[in-house]
Image: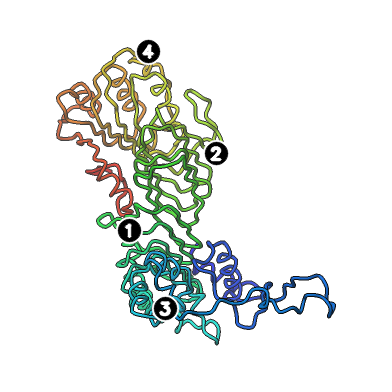
Amino acid sequence: MTYGQIEQYFNSMEGPTAQQRIDCIVAFLISFLPPPLVPAPEVAGDDSDDESFSLTSSDSETSDAGADLASFHPAALSDGEDHISRLPDALLSNIISRLATQEAARTVVLSTRWHGVWAATPLLIDDAHLVGADGLNDIPIMRAVSRCVAAHPGPVSGVRVTRVSFYSHEYSLRRLVADLADKDIQDLILFNRPWPLNMPLPKDILRCASLERLYLGVWQFPKITSAHPPLFDKLRELGLFHCILEILSIVMSYGSPSRLCIVSRSLQVAVDWKSTLHEVVLQDAPCLERLILQTMETRMPIKIVGAPRLEVLGFLDLNLHELEIGGIPIKARMNMKDRATVPSLKILAVTVHFVRNQEAKMLPTLLKCFPRLEALHVLAIPSESVSSDHDLEFWESLGSCERLESHLKTVMVHGCLVHNNEIGFLQYIIREGKALKAVGVDPSPKNMVAIDLVLASFGEGASSDDIFHARVDGRFIFQNAIDMTLDNPFCVDDPV
């Protein structure tokens, strides 16, 4: 569902307008944001608990309640010296960083010493400190935030903006985000108050490589190209509130055990590239079309719960990945149930050691999970051992597979098929794939048996020129994964 459809839906309802409904939602979302970087100044005239606190429990005139406390603790006489300015720069900078934005800036008038400290202090900006006496007003708040960032000679540590509707401030927004990228922003909370709901986030957000924490609310995320992928190698905390996010890539993310659970109504592509995730769950992803995996040597369950439009999946490692569909773990030679299938899947890539019996048994069962599979990529891992119970006889003993007969059009085998258990698989696929139009193998001299088998399957007149060169280049697969103009991200030279 698009934001335009949401607006139309809200406006069609009786009662509050779409604007009023969204205002309530926005206030609710903002309540989940991290607390302010610096507490907002108290409103003048607001009685604090300290002002009403009594040191006695008696209101009697004869009690000590009215005693002059100064007589017990007389104030020290001032010697006229500026003792605060004698503190080390690091301590003064720490003090300034704890002040509200306006008060911190005013310290420059104290002395030239404070001016230097202010310039070196990482800036913290919160638009709550910049609200004028007339309350919320986008123009002065936006102008104040932009000027603070642009004018500060030092780094900008944190910025929190939650009180501005950026619809009429697109130019200022672009300048602000560009300046934040140039000044090594570390902590950014940027929340847009709609309308419009599909407000585009400036592309310079992808240049903020120093970010350690990022919270975004009510934005349309910028398009990401394979030529200029974002780099957030320091990011430790990410919050996306009501964002239109279409592509999510997690690349070489290491650390404590982590779990990727996708609940998004806009995400189209999810990529886990050599990270140490311990579980991937497609919980509620109605628009997800691709799940691309390049896994480290760690076991990882992959659970497909709600991904009705998933078309591309791989590389599934039959040794490391434990697939679960609709709450049903997929086991070798199990009786297949409709609930354990993904009818939408068209392209599958798997990694398999054919010499390992468990993986060899798992592969034909796995193929039954995808009844409309059109393209199959198999990365055959070489093995020095040839001892396996699953040789030619195993593949010949398998019955017909109706789910492969009518839809499978392309098979690409990456790596060499040398042993009988590997050749047996290729024979099985060619036998069952009645609709096969293209078979790709590595044209290595070691692969001559496989090449001859493929040529024979296509009849007289076929030559080695008719066989596609199946090769795997991890760098290109990653770039292709986030390029939605390509139908098949696993093909360097796409025959489909």
* Nearer to the camera, 317 or 458: 317
Mark 2, residue position: 326
Residue at 37% over, 50% down = 249
Residue at 14% over, 35% down = 465
The label nearer to you, 1 versus 2, is 1
Mark 3, other Cα within 10 Å: few <14 / some 14–19 / many ≥20: some
Q: Distance between the residues labelled 4 and 3?
A: 79 Å
Quadrant assignment, res 169: bottom left
Q: Tell me residue 250's x, y (percent).
A: 38, 48
Q: Tell me residue 155's x, y (percent).
A: 34, 67
Residue 209, disc: 1
Q: Counting residues from the N terminus, which is met first, the one under dot 1 or under dot 4?
A: 1
Q: Counting residues from the N terminus, which is met first, the one under dot 4 or under dot 3?
A: 3
Residue 107, disc: 3
Mark 4, residue position: 389
* Count of numbered circles in the view: 4
Discs 4, 2 touching: Cβ within 8 Å: no
Q: Counting residues from the N terminus, which is met first, the one under dot 3 or under dot 2?
A: 3
The label nearer to you, 4 versus 3, is 3
Q: Distance between the residues labelled 1 and 4?
A: 52 Å
